[in-house]
Amino acid sequence: MGTGDQKTFPCQLISPAGKLLDCRTSSVVLPAHDGQVGILCNHMPMLCQLGMGVMRVAQLPEGGGETGSIRPEREFLVDGGFALVGENSVTVIAYEAMALPDVKAETIQSLLDTVNKNLAGTALSPAQRAHETERLRTLRRIAESIPS
């Protein structure tokens, strides 16, 4: 199946560090504040608040070549922000984001240490404590998937 057979749309991921992704895709899965959201071509327009989690993008090959049914998937750790789904386009503006293949075990451990310090503090509101607990769960899952 060539890329002409599949409906695609542009996807951008922007963080304070700059543009992390600008590609065409056939699907995006976002960590919304209230659960995962899957987006395919012709999705209704929407604006959603992001939570902490992994954003998955089925990135199409450069030049639109044949790839069979396998699409490489890019993954990003996203912590907060907003996603705008327009007419067949997705723009994600994240408070924090990083490409997962580039993340080293030491970086995840440093983030885990920060979260544990935050959770040990007594000045957290219930909402902040819930957010830090979700960060801890997500970071532990990612740490388990990174080869030592």
Image (spheres, rainbow, N blue to C red):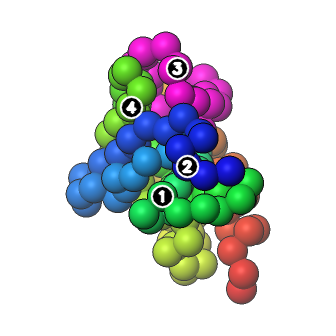
Q: Nearer the viewer, mark 4 or mark 2?
A: 2
Residue ID for mark 3: 43
Q: Considering the image in quadrants, where does the C terminus appear?
A: bottom right
State the separation of the CA atoms marked 1 and 2: 6 Å
From the viewer's perspective, tell me whether residue 34 is left or right of residue 80: right
Can residue 60 be seen in the rendering of this structure?
yes
- In the rendered image, the vertical position of residue 91 relative to residue 64, given as above or below: above
* C-beta proximity under 8 Å, tags 4 and 3: no
Residue ID for mark 1: 64
State the separation of the CA atoms marked 4 and 1: 18 Å
Residue at the location (60% across, 62% down)?
Answer: 66
Tell me the amino acid under the disc marked 1: Gly
Can you tell which quarter of the image residue 9 is in?
A: top left
- Badge 4 or badge 2: first in the primary sequence: 2
Residue ID for mark 2: 3
Magenta residues (range): 29-51
State the separation of the CA atoms marked 3 and 1: 22 Å
- Badge 3 or badge 1: first in the primary sequence: 3
* C-beta proximity under 8 Å, tags 1 and 2: yes
Residue at the location (55% across, 49% down)?
Answer: 3
- Mark identifier at residue 89: 4
Q: Is residue 78 magenta?
A: no
* C-beta proximity under 8 Å, tags 3 and 1: no
Can you tell which quarter of the image residue 38 is in?
A: top right
State the separation of the CA atoms marked 4 and 2: 17 Å
Q: Residue furthest bottom?
A: 148
Query: How packed is label 2: few (under 14 Cα within 10 Å), some, or many (20 or more)?
Result: some
- In the rendered image, the vertical position of residue 129 relative to residue 69, given as above or below: above
